[in-house]
Image (spheres, rainbow, N blue to C red):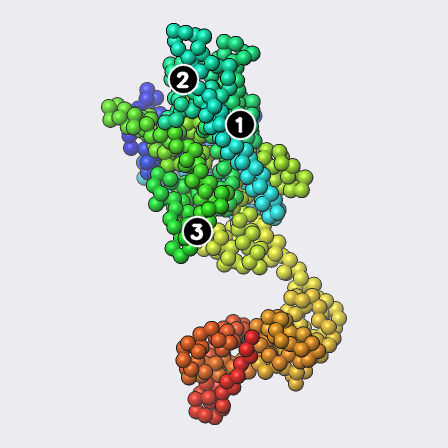
Amino acid sequence: MKQRRSNNIAGDVALQFWVEAHDGSYYPVDLTEFAEGRKREDVPPQLQARWPADFQGRLGFALGLSEVFQALCPPESYEADFRSSCRQLLRFLDSIDPDQSVKCFADLKDGHGIALAKWAEAKGFTGSVYKHIKGLVDAARMTSGSTPLFWPARERDPIVHKDDVDLKAYPRLYNAFKKEAMSIKAMFQEGERLANGGRDPRGLRSTRASAAWEQRENHAWLVRKLTRNTLPSKEDFYAAGARGLNKANNVRTQKHNGPEYLAPGMTERASEGIVGKLRWFHPSYQDTAVFFWLFLVGTGWNLSTAIGIDISDEKHWWEPHPQKPEFCVLHSFKGRADKHVFIPCLRKPEWHPYRIIEFMIKCTAPLRRTVLQRLADARAKYLSDGMPETAAEIVRLETMSRSPWLFHVVNKVGEVGCLHGDDSSHLNEIARLAAQKHGLFEDHPALAALVTGDARDAWIGHAYITSGNNILIARLAGQHEDYRSLVHYLRRRRYRAQSEGLVRAFQDVTFGEIESGRVLDATRIRLKLERGEITLEQERRLLDRRQRTRLGMGCLQPDSPPKNVSPDHVPGAICRVQRCTGCINGIVFEESLDPLTRARAELIYIQRTIPLAAWTGSSFEEEAASLDATLMDFAKESVGESTQLWLNKLLSGELQVHDTFPAY
């Protein structure tokens, strides 16, 4: 780990240094507050309202935390958690040890764990606060070589049940962002149209009268010329004689703003001066956010996965579909879970994820060239100075060069930025403003609390509901490695509601049967759950074994089979096809096992005695698949034994095969 020492050093351990994390990032760390303590007045004014409490400094803990950073080299995302945990630990110690007899992590005892858990509970903290403090203590003691403490495990957090995702809201939100994206594309087209009709407004240096700043088209022409390859700084604009883009000699005739369109979350500043006119050709933060939300809703990916897409090489982010040329497969990498994520999508539709990334790559090309140019400069500088600040800048620029989500910074001409994981709150606000702008709150009030993770929940919820509450389909949609991860998403929303609904319905039907004085019958209860009610005629027919079908099954409506089962059925007549295993009216009983397995054995016998070409695609093959699906409700061993028994009789000649099965 490269580190730059400061004057704030205790012994051989610095409290201010740079960390080179294992993920390749660099970031500065200053642990002075843990040695000296911190009060509300030391906190920036905008954060003072949320400052929980002051704490006294304990040098030993500051030094121990420094050793943790320098030994583990954690990613920068861990720094805030470590700081927060150490602050809470010192506040806890101030409450029980004001004389500071506990000076470092090594002075902590087993009993402090129970006291800490009670203190955190009394403060109203969630179990994760205690968990993170315990994790920090364990890491610090491991780093210093101290023995582990026997602190209790944290209490399980209560499940927070959210309202179901409003699935109808997301197509409307998607359309709202699509309209905004259309306006952004129209803004770019406007810039090109104006530039094509303009000329250089700077004129000749010797003849000031030749300048033409009074024409708006000329402003667009100059911006396009100066930013065609890379994005200049404000000083570069001025050096190129483009001061008139920002400061007009004649405000009435020469001062022109950029595009009139403002994306959700923008102020008038986004249309003024040089940065406003840059938006004719290059997206700003909110412009990029609009396309990012379209991509997010279209893929069902979460924030970190969508941001992690790497466009530095086409092979990194997409590949043609192996079977369907009109499709492609998008790829990304979810760093937190160390997991590859992919999704198939069409290549031609304008608003599908592939075309969105393709558009962003094209419209941010000058911004990316700017980043690559500055990256080359930073690498050259690092070869000469080797400073960690320069290394951190290299990592930042490398990350930006791989991102399709670039933008020019409105409050600093020439600065390029990209979306990253810390942008969640800003992106949430942009989505809410877009929903408000398009009048979606009245019909979909849940959008007022929209967050980026809801797009993923909506995607999984859509797959879960449209598949008939199929856990496997929902898992495939979420690309979870196991069902435990999937249930984490579903149990708070539709999974819980659907499960509770089934339990309530079962209880209602069961106690209804008891109340009516009936003997509980599993088949009757299942039918009432599936169909709501059973008529007396249906009940009589199901109980009469003489009215069982050729497969030993019962039938709810033998005179009205579905069209897909018996297309040529004569109204009023008894079903002649009796393809019961594929019919919604068919009811399977325990005693249906023998007739079903006999039919299965006959089909196995037929398959062995006819050519494969005659079997493939025939009604025999479809009947066999339907039988296998039905027999899955029985014990596998019973099905195998019964089928083999019937097959032996067919092979020995004791029985003749029934070789005529329904054609449909």
Quarter location, residue 76: top left
Image mark for residue 237? 2
Marks 3/2 in contact by CB < 8 Å: the verdict is: no
Decide: is 141 above or below 647: above
Q: Residues within 10 Å of mark 3 (few under 14, many from 20)?
A: some
SS label for mark 3: strand
Q: Quadrant of residue 367?
A: top left
Q: Position of residue 212 (x, y in %)?
A: 47, 14
Seen from the viewer's position, the closer of residues 90 and 465 is: 465
Residue visible at 59% across and 76% down in the picture: 580
Side of 653 where 539 appears, left or right: right
Residue carrying label 1: 51
Report the Cα–Cα distance between label 1 and label 2.
43 Å
**Disc 3 or disc 1, which is closer to the eye?**
3
Residue 497 as seen in the image, left or right of residue 642: right
What kind of element bears circle 2? Answer: helix
Residue type marked 1: Trp
Task: Name the residue at 41% across, 27% down.
Answer: 416
Residues at marks 3 and 1, CA–CA distance in whole angstroms: 52 Å
Q: Which mark is residue 246?
A: none
Q: Residue at label 3? A: 327
Quadrant of the rendering where the C terminus is positioned:
bottom right
Q: Between residue 56 and residue 365, name the one nearer to us.
A: 365
Q: Is residue 548 left or right of residue 364?
A: right
Q: Nearer the viewer, mark 1 or mark 2?
A: 2
Name above or below for residue 297 compared with residue 658.
above
